[in-house]
Structures are given as structure tokens and as C-alpha cells.
């Protein structure tokens, strides 16, 4: 889109978090007239203003949305954390105003080639790895989205030669319209965010929107082991490339024993042996295969891809080794924010484990997670809003070794007292961090701090 199209337009940015502030900055840079709105009247306008550009003319409104406001607006830009079915949003949509998300805004204001990743689990590792591959291939690369860098902050720096590697959540996909990646990927779809999407059918529909505007000139990388994604492949408008950790594919990328192999239809390429990778566990080998397939479809030579995947190490907060104290290894898997992600955390453990779980209730069910303990978990130490709910589920599954703790600091101390030499202590909560922490990063950082305090 021509970046001057929004000049002089009156735009409401809904939500004052990182995404909202990024959207304001971008809109003011293209000379739109911006109003920043947040329904939380307890927020401090002056604190919000400190996060805006120095000479920002943005008007800030908190609390109730003025009834006369919608009639004067040309566009609404939603922050991904704001549900689309709340009354103020319904009122804006009813007024016939276009509602974009921050990804849609950034995409229209940006330029170049977009490689976009979604899925319930593995997004951040795959995005970070693909970002490193692209940086080894070309100069102008932006790694953005749910990974912590606002897409909107980068958009105006992009040129036609740029590559954007974007981690896109279901919340962000809900408000896309023209967003069209050259290469997309859906890594997996398991139960998550039902408090926002309400049904699995809606959650699946939203995830698959990543490929909605693609054509046969584009590529969509899908997990062959996910039944829903195999079904989606038949209706996906892009060229589908499968990855598989359990099946040898006629075409696609797959694990063959300890080898990652790619078949293109014309040749068979040995990508790497899993023992050459620094990433552990089958779920990480799936992430590597997805990143390899995306980079290859994006035109990166296999030699470049190979060099990067062999040196790449795990991202923070995802089965991250912290310390070994008194022969007990401590691991931070704070990014295990739902049961399926936490299953992968416990599967990666190769010693008896004391597991810390619990947090904000996203209306998940926990039985499958508990059944995946597979004799590895000696104690399950629970914190947060969900601790009684998870304890009840554990006892219902016949797992009785549960301990309820007041907070994360107490949970770490309990684990240190109960652990034997040779054990592991794993923070892998199967829940979001909200209520106790601002985000999973803060939760993981606090865990690391409490662990290191044990040495004091």
C-alpha cells in the first residue's frame, strides 16, 4: 500500500500495550490523526504519554468510549490482547468502520517478502531460527511479531529487498484482511486460548487464516502429524510443503532415524543429522524442519541453512538450562503456557523431575499433561489461580504427589528441599502467567533469580 494513504485520516488505536504504542508511532509517522483508547480507566495518561514519541499529538481516552466518537473515525487498529466481542468493539464495527489489527497495519505500510509462522507451540523457536537463517542469507531482515518486536515499529524501515520473519498469534490473525505471506507455516494446532476463541473450531479457523490470501505462487508449510492440518492441506490455496517427525514423505521434509531429509520431487537432500543440532527433543526437530522448509521455499541455499541450524541454540524460557546446584539441574520452561507445550517440556527431561505448574486459567484441561508424566515426575508443585483445579485433575488421574505453594519463590524452595542428587527441577506451568506476572518472560526471569538465590 502507498504509505501516504493514511495521511490526515482519523484513526483510533484500541489498547495501550506494546502493540498499541507501536501502532501509534507508525500512524503518526505517516501523518494520520491518532486517538489512543484503553477501556481501563485506572491507567495513568501521563505514564502512557511517556511511551509515545516526544512530540506526539495523540489524544488519549481511558474508560468508556465516547458515543459520538465512532462517527468521526476512518479506521480502528486493534491491539491483539483486546477481544473482538466486547461492547465497545461491537459498537465500532456496527458503525461500519474498518477494523484492522496491528499486523494488517504493519503489512500494508511495510514492503518486501514476508515469511509468517503460527501454531499453538514452537512459534518462537522456529521464528528465531528462521530469522537467523535469513540474516545469514541477506542484509535486510526483520524478525517481528509475537516474538517481542512490534511489527509496526519495523514497517517503515522495510524496502522491496527486505525479508520479514513474523511470529503471528491467533489473536493477531483475527484482524488480518489483506495480509499475504510469501511463505507461511502452521506448526500444530492443540487446545489453547478457548477463553478468547470459545470453541476449538473457531481457534482452528483463525489459525488457518494465515494462508487465506496466498495463491499457488506461495508456499504453506504444514505439520503432517497434525490431523487437522492434513485436512486443511486439501483446501489450502498455497503450495503445501509437509514436515513429519514420524513418516517418510514422498515429498517434503522428514526425520529418517537420526537424519533430517528433504525430498523436493526431483531430488533427495540430506539436510543434517539430529546429533549435529544443539536443539534437544523431537518437538525441536520439528521446529528445525519447519524453519528449513520455509527458508528453502524462500530461496535460501541449503548450505546456508545447514550452517545456521547446526549452530543455533534454544531460545530463553524454552527448556532453558539455568543452574546445577547440589547435583540438581534446574530448567526454565516458562514458555510452556498451555498443556501441550508443557507436555513437550516434560518429554525433554531425561531424569527424575520435580515439576512446577499452575498460573492463569485459560480454561484448558490438564489430564493429558498429567498422563504424559510417564513416571518421570516425583512431585508436582502448584501455584496460581489454577492450583486446586490442576491438583483435582492430577488426583483424578491417580497422580497423588502434589504440593500447593503460595507463590513461585516458595515453589522453588520446596523443590530444592525435596530434590535428590541427579533430579531435575522444571518450571513448565501449562498455564499463562497473567495475574502473578506481566508475561512468561518475567515469570521465567523470576524463576532463574529464585534458583540462583539458592546458592547464596
Image (cartoon, rainbow, N blue to C red):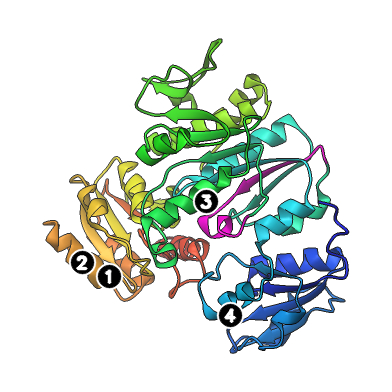
For marks 2 and 1, give the CA distance: 6 Å
State the residue position of label 3. 316
Comes first in the chain, label 1 or label 4: 4
Please report the residue visible at 66 percent of the width from the left and 37 percent of the height from the top: 182
Please report the residue visible at 20 percent of the width from the left and 66 percent of the height from the top: 391
Comes first in the chain, label 3 or label 1: 3
State the residue position of label 2. 391
* Contact (Cβ within 8 Å) of mark 2 with mark 1: yes
For marks 2 and 4, give the CA distance: 38 Å
- Helix or strand or loop: what does disc 3 sit on? loop
Q: Nearer the viewer, mark 2 or mark 3?
A: 2
For marks 1 and 4, give the CA distance: 33 Å
Q: Residue furthest left?
A: 398
Please state which of residues 6 and 298 is positioned toward the viewer in this rendering. Answer: 6
Looking at the rendering, the stretch of residues picked out in magenta corresponds to 160-176
- Helix or strand or loop: what does disc 2 sit on? helix
- Mark 2, other Cα within 10 Å: few <14 / some 14–19 / many ≥20: many
For marks 3 and 1, give the CA distance: 25 Å
Image position of 94 with respect to 218: above or below: below
Comes first in the chain, label 2 or label 4: 4
For marks 2 and 3, give the CA distance: 28 Å
| Residue 1 locus on image (x, y percent) | 81, 51
Please state which of residues 8 and 221 is positioned toward the viewer in this rendering. Answer: 8
Please report the residue visible at 57 percent of the width from the left and 42 percent of the height from the top: 211
Q: Nearer the viewer, mark 3 or mark 1?
A: 1
State the residue position of label 1. 387
- Helix or strand or loop: what does disc 1 sit on? helix
For marks 3 and 4, give the CA distance: 37 Å
Amino acid at each position: 500500500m502507498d504509505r501516504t494513504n493514511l495521511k490526515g485520516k482519523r484513526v483510533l488505536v484500541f489498547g495501550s500495550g506494546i502493540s498499541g504504542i507501536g501502532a501509534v508511532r507508525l500512524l503518526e509517522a505517516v501523518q494520520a490523526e491518532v486517538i489512543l483508547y484503553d477501556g481501563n480507566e485506572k491507567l495513568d495518561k501521563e505514564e502512557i504519554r511517556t511511551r509515545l514519541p516526544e512530540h506526539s499529538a495523540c489524544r488519549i481516552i481511558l474508560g468508556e468510549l465516547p458515543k459520538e466518537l465512532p462517527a468521526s473515525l476512518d479506521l480502528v487498529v486493534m491491539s491483539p490482547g483486546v477481544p473482538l466481542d466486547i461492547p465497545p468493539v461491537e459498537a465500532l464495527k456496527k458503525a461500519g468502520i474498518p477494523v484492522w489489527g496491528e499486523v494488517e497495519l504493519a503489512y500494508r505500510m511495510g514492503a518486501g517478502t514476508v515469511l509468517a509462522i503460527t501454531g499453538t507451540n514452537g512459534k518462537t523457536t522456529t521464528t528465531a531460527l528462521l530469522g537467523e537463517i535469513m540474516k545469514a542469507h541477506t542484509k535486510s531482515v526483520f524478525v517481528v511479531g509475537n516474538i517481542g518486536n512490534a511489527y509496526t515499529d519495523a514497517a517503515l524501515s522495510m524496502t522491496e529487498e527486505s525479508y520479514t520473519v513474523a511470529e503471528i498469534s491467533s489473536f493477531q490473525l483475527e484482524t488480518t484482511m489483506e495480509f499475504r505471506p510469501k511463505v507461511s507455516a502452521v506448526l500444530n494446532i492443540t487446545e489453547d486460548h478457548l477463553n478468547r476463541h470459545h470453541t476449538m473450531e473457531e481457534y482452528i479457523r483463525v489459525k488457518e487464516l494465515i494462508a487465506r490470501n496466498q495463491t499457488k505462487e506461495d508456499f504453506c508449510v504444514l505439520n503432517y502429524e497434525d490431523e487437522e492440518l492434513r485436512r486443511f492441506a486439501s483446501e489450502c490455496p498455497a503450495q503445501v510443503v509437509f514436515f513429519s517427525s514420524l513418516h517418510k514423505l514422498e515429498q517434503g521434509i522428514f526425520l529418517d532415524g537420526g537424519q533430517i531429509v528433504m525430498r523436493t520431487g526431483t531430488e533427495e537432500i540430506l539436510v543434517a543429522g539430529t546429533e549435529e543440532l544443539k536443539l534437544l527433543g523431537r518437538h525441536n526437530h520439528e521446529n528445525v524442519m519447519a524453519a528449513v522448509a520455509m527458508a528453502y521455499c524462500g530461496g535460501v541455499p541449503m548450505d546456508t541453512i545447514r550452517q545456521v541450524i547446526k549452530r543455533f541454540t534454544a531460545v530463553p524460557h524454552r527448556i532453558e538450562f539455568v543452574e546445577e546446584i547440589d547435583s540438581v539441574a534446574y530448567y526454565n520452561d516458562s514458555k510452556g503456557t498451555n498443556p501441550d507445550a508443557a507436555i513437550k517440556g516434560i518429554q525433554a527431561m531425561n531424569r527424575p523431575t520435580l515439576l512446577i505448574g499452575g498460573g492463569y486459567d485459560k480454561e484448558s484441561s490438564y489430564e493429558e499433561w498429567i498422563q504424559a508424566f510417564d513416571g518421570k515426575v516425583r512431585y508436582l508443585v502448584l501455584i496460581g489461580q489454577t492450583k486446586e483445579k490442576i491438583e483435582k485433575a492430577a488426583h483424578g488421574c491417580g497422580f497423588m504427589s502434589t504440593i500447593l505453594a503460595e507463590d513461585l519463590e516458595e515453589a522453588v524452595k520446596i523443590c530444592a528441599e525435596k530434590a535428590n542428587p541427579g533430579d531435575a527441577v522444571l518450571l513448565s506451568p501449562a498455564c499463562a502467567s497473567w495475574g502473578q506476572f506481566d508475561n512468561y518472560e518475567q515469570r521465567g526471569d523470576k524463576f532463574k533469580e529464585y534458583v540462583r538465590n539458592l546458592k547464596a
